[in-house]
Image (cartoon, helix red, strand yellow):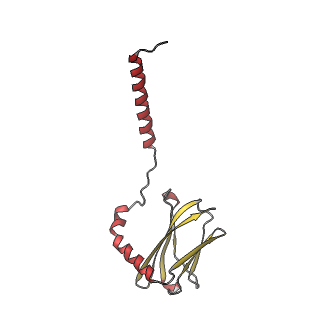
Amino acid sequence: MKINWGIRIAILYISFVLLILTLVTKSMFQQLDLVVSDYYEQELKYNNMMDKIKNMKKLKNPISWIITDGQFKIYFTKELSSKSVSGTITFYRPSDSKEDKTFDIQLNDNNEQTININEFKKGVYILQIDWKHNQSAYYYEGIINILN
């Protein structure tokens, strides 16, 4: 059976239209997350963040951390008094903003804090620690991979 050239053009045109409609439908249901919801506001605070990072680099051994048995242990430098440290620890998940977790800093007498990470989904998180000690502000950022 031979197909007329007009029918071939019609089949090609209909196939193209179906392809475009499929792509449009898929793009409508695609989840798009910005890195952060208040991107422009945070961009304006960039210089402030750079000052916090400089302050953190002036400390001797400012922060160290370890993951053991479903526990995330973070150790602050002994230069800081545990009673006067305040701030937040954020586990930022780039692939899904719904999985972000934020904790207040509550150090024990040894300048350490333990966080249970058993409920965290497996994957890569960006660790963001923003804290103040007396009148100085500090910021630390690192990458961790949770393998629960």
x and y, in percent, of residue 57 in the image? 44, 80
Q: Name the foreground residue: 132 vs 11.
A: 11
- Residue 4, compared with residue 33, is above or below; it is above
- Residue 28, compared with residue 13, is above or below; it is below
Which residue is at a point 41% across and 83% down the rendered structure image? 136
Q: Quadrant of residue 28?
A: top left
x and y, in percent, of residue 147 in the image? 62, 62
Q: Name the foreground residue: 104 vs 59.
A: 59
x and y, in percent, of residue 14 in the image? 41, 26
Specify the farthest residue to the right: 69
Number of numbered discs on residues: 0
The C terminus lies in which quarter of the figure? bottom right
x and y, in percent, of residue 41 in the image? 34, 65
Q: Quadrant of residue 134?
A: bottom left
Which residue is at a point 53% across and 63% down the rendered structure image? 125
Specify the farthest residue to the top: 1
Which residue is at a point 40% across and 59% down the rendered structure image? 37
